[in-house]
Image (spheres, rainbow, N blue to C red):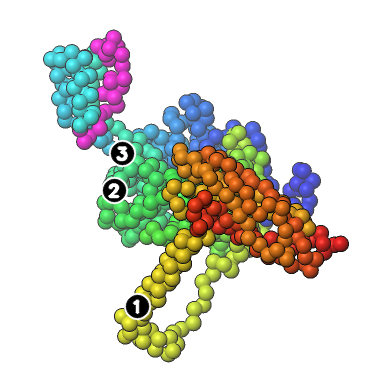
Amino acid sequence: LAPASGNWTEYINGKWLDAHYDPVANLYTFSSCIVLADLHGDGENKLVVGDLGTGSSNMKLKVYRGTGLMSENTLLDLPTGLVSFLMDQHEPRTPAIAVASGPYIYVYKNLRPYFKFTLPPLEVNALEQDVWNQAREDMIDPLSLKEMLDSIRDKADVPLSVRSLRFLMLDPQDMEAFVNLYKEQPIRRQTVITCISTLKKNMADEDAVSCLVIGTESKDVYILDPEAFTVLTKMSLPSAPTQMDVTGQFDVEFRITVACRNGNIYVLRRESPKPKYCIELSSHPVGLVRIGKNVVVGCAQETLQGFTQKGKKLWTVCLPAPVTTMSVMDLPTRGFQAVLVGLANSEVHLYRDKNLISTIKTPDIVTSICFGRYGREDGTLIMTTKGGGLIVKILKRTAVFDDRDSAPGPPLAQSIRLNVPKKTKLYVDQTMRERENSVAMHRAFQMDLSRLRLAAARAYVKALESSLTPMSSSLSEPLRMNAVVQGLGPSFKLTLNIQNTAVCRPVMNLAISFLYDESLYSMKTAFFKIPLLVPGLNYPIDTFVECLSDKGISDIIKVFVLREGKSAPLLTAHINMPVSEGLALN
């Protein structure tokens, strides 16, 4: 099993052996339509695949042994799910294959058609039945029939049948022929299967008899008897199920976790016809698996989330690409369980809890994943790709998965809870003191807070009255000013940006004055007038400052914006002058 690409380092250090890759296997399927089963009771598991074909034709049930196709059966419709289960206790203990397709379940035993189960018909709308009876007796014409069916569809609790919905889609010239063709036939409402799984009947053993669990488009979940194929239990959901995970035993206690089309996950339990718990997600679920007592969900917004059985959120992991499929990696011999996540960037990530412990690069986007015993090898990973390829990898017996997260991000220790010490006597005494003197402590806190607010308000009023802020508080002259100092020294360029923030009123008759230490700085013009300020425009005013000291010290230059006839300035700015580096170098 030497690598074809010659990458010996990856081959030696990797955890997987490349057993087989067929890019033109023409397998188009999903994880719900692929299963590993010992079909002949010889201890050698086969790969059973429900092939979707082109989507409208060439649907087949294919069985692989090793790397070759062993047999195939033609399917009449698109498969929505495929499971293997033991129907009875008869020897030899060979499992049957159940293929869900439309409203039917096709059961194969020894790879031959054995039984066909049809979902029970749904209740027909009584008003719809009366309307079609009138049409059969020619009491109403097709246009009247259309109007009456339209009103029934808008108001009735029971949906219309497929026949009525098809009739409402027809053009007026085709309605009469449709009515004459179907009016003598009874009305039926039939739902379809959306997902399928298995549930152990009364024993938890691996070779125990299992019931079939099916989810339907009519928002129902049925549990079927494995021998008579009668409905044992019917449970209702708020929305149509898309994926499910089943655990437990029917006669003892079971739990069915269902992802629904409304974006929520519901948990069904024994003797409860409606969901026991509900998990609300921020985006639609695209993958659902169970690890121990936790549920791991892959969401459409490129996240992987972990929940408890009761719906409490444990963790969230952001993924680098959208999720295409998910499956469980279970190795009972090592006591190892993890989640395999296929991504749209042609990678398969292996997560244990929230930690990424391995990454598998694939030549194409993976559409289905199945891990288990294939042939006589326990740790076999089987994947199909978007282009119809088949990939088989075998886990090395020397492979070791570290619990530390290989993804970039915060260290694992960050998620470990701190060992908080027990409460000491001092802590208890302080708690009792605070409880007894809570009113006095609250009053003291409120008093200090009020004093702080008063001091801040007084300082703010003082700044406004003295015009110490770079923004004017006057409504008649709303101004804003900022200053920029440029240069290394001893000569500096001082630029003042003045803006009139009024809506439509100009400001005039203003002047600027500078106050500075004359022993440190000199300015050619320390006072000059400002031109008329148009609202919204920025007026840059430049002047030059000369530093007179060679001791490497600096000071503040104060800038005042004045109005003729007023002693108090409108604006005040303090400019922290930099140290003159030019004199220091000289």
Q: Which-is-in-front pick, marks 2 and 1?
A: 1
Q: Estimate the x, y position of residue 551 in percent, counting from the top left.
A: 79, 68
Indicate which disc residue 442 carries: 1
Q: Crowding at label 3, few (<14), some or many (≥20) Cα neighbours within 10 Å?
A: some
Where residue 449 appears, as percent x and y from the top left, is 40, 73
Relative to 445, say whether 167 is above or below: above
Q: Earlier in the sequence, mark 3 or mark 1?
A: 3
Label 2 amino acid? Met
Q: CA distance from mark 3 to mark 1?
A: 59 Å
User: Where in the figure is residue 73, as x and y percent of width and height?
Assistant: 50, 32
Label 1 sits on a secondary structure element that is: helix
Q: Which residues are magenta?
A: 156-178
Which residue is situated farthest in the right direction here?
Answer: 586
Residue 564 part of the magenta-drawn span: no
- Tag shown at residue 218: 3
Q: Amino acid at mark 1?
A: His
The answer to whether marks 3 and 1 mark residues whose Cβ atoms lie closer than 8 Å is no
Q: Amino acid at mark 3?
A: Ser
Q: Nearer the viewer, residue 287 or 31?
A: 287
- Main SS of residues in magenta: helix
In percent of width and height, residue 580 lies at: 77, 61
Location of residue 172 by image quarter = top left
Question: Which residue does the image show at 55% across and 34% down from the upper left?
Answer: 28
Residues at marks 2 and 3, CA–CA distance in whole angstroms:
11 Å
| Residue drawn at 55 percent across, 40 percent down | 532
Q: CA distance from mark 2 to mark 1?
A: 55 Å
The first of marks 2 and 1 along the sequence is: 2
The residue singled out by tag 2 in the image is 235
Q: Nearer the viewer, mark 3 or mark 1?
A: 1
Q: Secondary structure at mark 3?
A: loop
